[in-house]
Image (cartoon, rainbow, N blue to C red):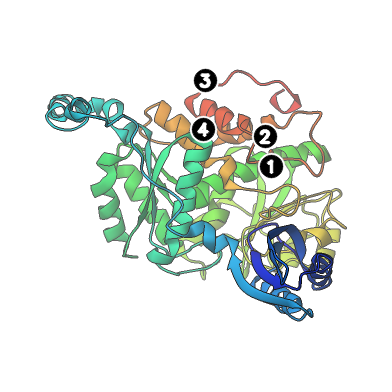
Amino acid sequence: MAVTASSYSITMRLHTAPDHGVVGQVATAISSAGGVVTAIDVVDSMAERLVLDVTCSAGDADHAKQLETAVDALDGVEVYKVSDRTFLLHIGGKIEVSSKVPLRNRDDLSMAYTPGVGRVSMALAENPDDVRRLTVKGNSVAVVTDGSAVLGLGNIGPGAAMPVMEGKAALFKRFADIDAWPICLASQDTDEIVKAVEMIAPGFGGINLEDIAAPRCFEIERRLRESLDIPVFHDDQHGTAIVVLAALTNALRVVQKDLTSARVVVSGAGAAGTAIVTLLLAAGLSDVVVVDREGALCEGDDSLSPAHTTLASQTNPRKVTGGLQDVLVGADVFIGVSAPGILKPEWIGDMAEKPVVFALANPDPEVDPGEAEKYAAVVASGRSDYPNQINNVLAFPGVFRGLLDARAHEITIDMLLRAATAIALVVKDEELNPNFIIPTVFNMDVPKAVAAAIRGTNPAPTGSAAD
């Protein structure tokens, strides 16, 4: 059973017989049931009993229950309480507001609030361009969702989307020192969403659209970009595209192929797939085939939706038809942003020499990365428990840091291309290998490099990819 490091981690409070040998029995029972023990703490030791806290990771919620049952079945062991560490972390939410200025006495209040604040408000009324400089607007982003396409969970609504948006706000702060607020809208009507964002826009320096289903997300983004004077960024589209292009740049360096001559198959014609294709084409790719549930998108197919018709007109220059297995034959790269288990590992063997496979569906990829490695030269996924994790955290903090610093009014394709190049070049030539084509999200050089690239101020990097 696949085991995660923490997302299905539990802590069991145990009451046991007063025998320290029971610690080994507990660890053995958990291991035999497929779990991984990460900590055992003796909370209390008395003549009549021991109190232990045992923390372990499981593959999923059902597996966690199996670990509990296995431990409870031991003689002299009682599972007194079980705590899910992920739920404990979310109690009360993950973010808060704190003051940047001291409020110790009346003197502080008179400047931070009334009457002094009135002077600042009047100055802003006379000079609106100073709002970004004298308020939080200059360092703030609205993380906006309607809850219609949350992670891989589907249309679960704005309330259920809140933990994800809180997490996004926490990542903004951690990786780019940006103050972000979750805005979960109780509507999935395009006009209402656009109007709501337009109405809150004065308080923000940028808008991050998140987890809004296609094709509605395309129109919402387009209309907001036209009506607002601050950058609007749909992370599910453009953040994903940036990181995919960065990873693909380095993967092709590993297999010594060129993007402009590569044949690429993209599985998934939704928001992420469309954005990936658009950015790859802008980067110089000429041969890309997009596949959805019905097969390869091909120009001239009257059954396609308007969005897919546009995508077909920009792709599939050889007019290939058929399903995923058919179009993979001879391809250099597979990029999946679609559904779990749709790519059989043996199909990779029909691809070109030294194929590259990006299976990015979450939480379960299009093909098991371990199986894909038997056929592919480079494999990447969205998972943290395999090498080469394609994670949007590599892009959006630095993107917005650069946009806010530059007081930008929009984001352009050229900015996205520069951001992708910046991420790719963080991986030095001596570090690059099939299992390391993309930097870790905790590499703080990444948001700095991306922000500089967005501003257009980054120094010329060194390394073969820049030549």
Dot 3 crowding, Cα within 10 Å, few <14, some 14–19, many 20+: few
Residue corresponding to mark 4: 414
Q: For the residues marked 3 and 2, what is the alpha-carbon distance in whole angstroms?
A: 17 Å
User: What residue is drawn where x is 43% and y is 36%?
Assistant: 178
- Please name which of the two marks, 2 or 4, marks the residue nearer to the observer: 2
Amino acid beneath label 1: Ala
Circle 4: element type: helix
Q: For the residues marked 2 and 4, what is the alpha-carbon distance in whole angstroms?
A: 16 Å
Left or right position of 153 against 264:
left
Circle 3: element type: loop
Amino acid beneath label 3: Thr
Q: Of callouts 3 and 2, which one flags the residue occurring earlier in the amino acid sequence?
A: 2
Residue corresponding to mark 3: 457
**Where residue 181 sits in the image (x, y, percent)?**
37, 47
Dot 4 crowding, Cα within 10 Å, few <14, some 14–19, many 20+: some
Q: Of callouts 3 and 1, which one flags the residue occurring earlier in the amino acid sequence?
A: 1
Q: Of callouts 2 and 4, which one flags the residue occurring earlier in the amino acid sequence?
A: 4
Residue corresponding to mark 1: 247
* Quadrant location, the C terminus: top right
Dot 1 crowding, Cα within 10 Å, few <14, some 14–19, many 20+: many
Is 349 or 25 nearer to us in this picture? 25
